[in-house]
Image (cartoon, rainbow, N blue to C red):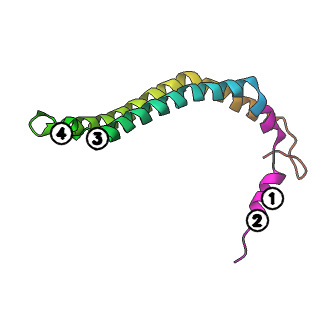
Amino acid sequence: MAQDTSQPNEMAARHDPFYDELHASDDFVELRRRYRGFAVPATVLFLAWFLLYVVLSNWATGFMSHRLFGNINVALVFGLLQFLSTFLIAFVYSRYSTANLDPLATKLQDRYEADLAGRPTGPKGTGH
């Protein structure tokens, strides 16, 4: 079966040097720095918290099976806290993104759209 190779060639032909300029801009570098500044620590903390749960479930069964009240034990509470921490991280990221990432992303998008608007159109133009 023959593979369709037209799309990669089409994508290479449509490469936009303005993307390279945006990618190298101070605003884009700052946007990536801010994103990594949140994403990396949040990911490390969540994975450490999750691995703690897994390790305790495997090797501290006495502690994890300790009943807190009724049929509720430590393992169940830890498991439910995994869900809670996931939603908490999503909520905090949403607020962080709105305050710190979206303004820069909007600025970059506006800059790109202004460049697009200023391009010539027609059969030989690069306008989209």
* Residue located beneath label 3 in the image: 59
Which sits in the foreground, 10 or 79? 79
| Spatial separation of the CA atoms under disc 3 and disc 1 | 54 Å
Mark sitting earlier along the chain (1/4): 1
What residue is rendered at 73% in x and 75% in y? 2
Q: Label 3: how many residues lie within 10 Å, few (<14), some (14-19) or many (20+)?
A: few
Q: Which residue has dot 2 on it?
A: 5
**Does residue 73 appear to the left or right of 85 in the view shown?**
left
- The Cα–Cα distance between marks 4 and 3, rounded to whole angstroms, is 11 Å
Percent of width and height locating residue 115: 80, 34
Residue 114 appears in the rendering: no
Question: Any mark on residue 9, and which?
Answer: 1
Q: Are marks 2 and 1 in contact (CB under 8 Å)?
A: yes
Q: Amino acid at mark 4?
A: Ser
Label 4 to label 2: alpha-carbon separation: 57 Å
Identify the residue position indicated by label 4 in the image. 65
Observer able to see residue 107: yes
Residue 37 higher or lower than 116, as above or below: above
Q: Quadrant of residue 110?
A: top right
Q: Amino acid at mark 1?
A: Asn
Classified by dominant secondary structure, the portion drawn in magenta counts as: helix
Determine contact: label 4, label 2, CB under 8 Å.
Answer: no
Q: Does the magenta-highlighted stretch encompass residue 91?
A: no
